[in-house]
Amino acid sequence: MEPGPERRGTNPANHPQHSGAPPEAAGPCRRRRRRRLLGRGFLIALACLLLLNVAAAVRERGPAAVAAVGGGLSTGLSWLGDALPGANEVKVYRAGPVRWLANRIKGEVRIGLQVGHLDAAAQPDELESLRYSTGAHHAGLNEVDINAAVVEALAARMRARGAVVDVLPATIPPRYRADLVLSVHADSNLDGTRSGYKSAHYWPARNPNEAWLKVTVDRAVLIATGLADDDVNVSSNMLQYYAFNHRRFKHAVARGTPALLVELGYLSNATDRSWLQAPDDLAAALEVGVVTYLRSIGRVSQAW
Ligand SMILES: [Zn+2]
């Protein structure tokens, strides 16, 4: 603790006002009253917070969680927990007006779509080693072209809904912020039978929403395409993706922005290739995932 300036009001004897003119004598009293009121307000706020916390615990874990507190109280809290708006929903509750205000402050929905490997040669010095990371190639097909086609189709779909879309190359603008970022990639392997879709957010997750973004996008793509779930082949490069590594690199997505890398299939597999050569179909699947995500967190209306 720093040695502060003289402490005020602890000892009235130190205050010249007490021995001075009467109008000034009211100062410390008023200050004391104000302090008492503040203290009481703080205690009430603390009690409310505690009660809400316990009610939330009851809602999540059932009355048994606070049974130790006493039967009657636990029943009362259980009732309070059920009465809370959104009691039967898993999502975090936010009152309508608060959500509306938050969305107004954030403005338009902004989505960053990264074309994996695009303009890799232009990577800045901190990412110099990735200047030759030009993506997969197979039988005359280039990953970067497929990534670009999917991003273009998805951008058109999201813009048609009113979102602002930034199409990003391999180099992300420093601390890029948006409602979400998707980094679009495709894979290739010497084993032509290897097939499927996989995705990864940074590990450890940088914010609470990216895990949910992964769930919604994965579900949408796996359901729409019927592609195999290739989660077993998620690599450490995916989990430590440079463009999401805000601690190490300046040119990375801001920590609070949920970001997901998707590998949409293998160029080296015939089934996957038929999907990769139909970019708008993949974009439609990704769109379902993104829209589901934005709706479920209350960023857009159900009709958006
Ligand atoms: Zn790639």
Image (cartoon, helix red, strand yellow):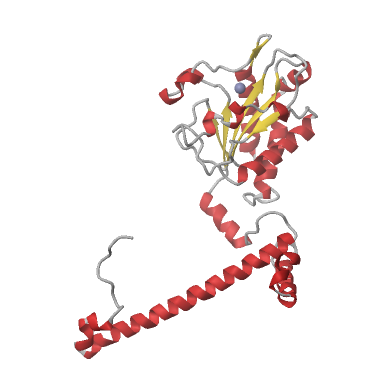
Q: Where is residue 19 drawn, in percent x and y? A: 20, 88
Q: Where is residue 286 drawn, in percent x and y? A: 69, 34
Q: Is residue 264 above or below residue 212?
A: above
> Which residue is at the far front?
68
**Residue at position x 20%, y 82% from top?**
16
Q: Is residue 71 above or below residue 2?
A: below
Please name whichever residue, 120 or 165, is drawn nearer the observer in this view of the structure.
120
> Which residue is at the far top?
139
Please name whichever residue, 86 or 295, is drawn nearer the observer in this view of the structure.
86
Q: Where is residue 285 drawn, in percent x and y? A: 73, 33
> Which residue is at the far bottom?
22
Q: Report which quarter residue 191 is drawn in.
A: top right
Q: Is residue 21 above or below residue 66?
A: below
Please name whichever residue, 119 or 280, is drawn nearer the observer in this view of the structure.
119
Q: Where is residue 25 drawn, in percent x and y? A: 26, 87
**Residue at position x 43%, y 24% from top?**
124
Left or right, 176 with reference to 109: left
Left or right, 11 with reference to 134: left
Left or right, 249 with reference to 156: left
Q: Report which quarter residue 287 is drawn in.
A: top right
**Residue at position x 60%, y 47% from top?**
208
User: Where does ligand 1 appear, by image quarter?
Assistant: top right
Q: Report which quarter residue 180 is drawn in.
A: top right
